Image (spheres, coloured by chain):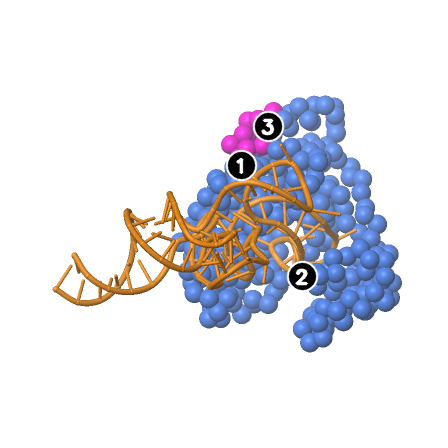
Amino acid sequence: MSKHLIVIAGPTGIGKTLTGIKTARHFNTEIVSSDSRQLFKELRIGTAVPSREELSAAKHHFIHSHSIFDNYNASQYEKEAIGLLKQLFEKHDIVLMVGGSMLYIDAVCKGIDQMPDADPELRKNLKNQLETEGLENLRRQLKKLDPKYYSEVDLKNPARIIHALEISLMTGKPYSSFRSNPQKQRPFSIHKIALNCERQELHRRINQRVDKMVATGLEQEARRYYKQKHLNALNTVGYREFFAYFDGEISKEKAIELIKRNSRRYARKQLTWFRKDTETNWFEPNQADEIISFIENKTAENE
RNA sequence: GGGGAGAUACCGAAGCGGUCAAACGGGGCAGACUGUAAAUCUGUUGGCUCAGCCUUCGUAGGUUCGAAUCCUGCUCUCCCCA
């Protein structure tokens, strides 16, 4: 019997959780979340984690499984998720992966290259250099250390340049030498589904959900972690805007408005990513039945 | 009823005779992406048969070689006085 990973992706607020649960129940299987923020146990309202009822309706993994104080990243997720999937496939022929974190999904479906974690001190140092000496200075260093990558990167993107420098400096080898564009073979077949609907409707859902988050105490949740605002886990839509409000930079109304806007933009970015993946099969959020029969067909084909 | 200010592209807002399809901001749209990824960055935003052409700056006329810019009527909005 062959094994199948069903990926259910889509933009934020589209209804992945509900569709995932319905599907999981139908196939009597479990859900591996691919959401880079719902895995932090401290975060609840702003990340729209599944409710207690939803969690008990289907077994979920990678929900509230880690802490914002851990330094988590896509590579760790790859390792842990692949390990978990191995276990789950001992019990199930079909397993669901539900979530919208594009890079995390790709880490599992395609794999990412092995390289060291960035040293926090070094990163701080490089960020500092960016502030004081500017991007041009970092570019010059990269040109020297890794001319190949220098010729490929977006030279206006500090995050990319800093990361390449980190790896190059830490290992003494050019960053590009680690990049092999892997297509790792997995011991299961992968079927990708993405949810989408009319843009106007998506925006309506997103705005509405943000209002609900605010009504159920997002401000207090953000306040609780205000001191930890420098943590990467909290560089997250819904929290960063409230931090700016706490810092007195913007009004509360402005913060809420920005949360909505940034969520809309995030959704658009997700759609761009999923659209680029030609393996994506598109459905509407209310097409759970169609999705189920799609999965039945797909998994039967490979018997 | 009297006086004043104003109507600019999706929204806000510059422009005040040619170099204006119209600065700038917001919003939107599109794209890039392998360890920060809910991150970081880029492009685009009147229409088209697109290095050119066509229709736009409340509306109808007028002045001018030439108008978003000047003049007149009309409509609407805001403010002040009654």
- Label 1: which secondary element: loop
Question: Residue beneath label 2, please?
Answer: A71
- Alpha carbon of mark 2 to alpha carbon of mark 3: how far? 36 Å
Q: Given contact means CB atoms under 8 Å apart, are the residues at marks 3 and 1 in contact?
A: no
Question: Residue beneath label 3, please?
Answer: A292
Indicate the chain on which mark 1 is placed.
Answer: A
Residue in front for this viewpoint, A249 or A8:
A249
Residues packed near mark 1 inside 10 Å, few (<14), some (14 to 19) or many (20 plus): some
Indicate the chain on which mark 3 is placed.
Answer: A
- Alpha carbon of mark 3 to alpha carbon of mark 1: how far? 18 Å
Q: Colour of chain A?
A: blue
Residue in front for this viewpoint, A194 or A289:
A194
> Which residue is at 80% across, 69% downward?
A140
Residues packed near mark 3 inside 10 Å, few (<14), some (14 to 19) or many (20 plus): some
The amino acid pointed to by label 2 is Asn
Q: Give left or right: position of B77 versus B41.
A: left
Rendering coords of residue B49 (x, y %):
65, 36
The amino acid pointed to by label 3 is Ile
Indicate the chain on which mark 2 is placed.
Answer: A
Q: Could you tell me which quadrant the C terminus of chain A lies in?
A: top right
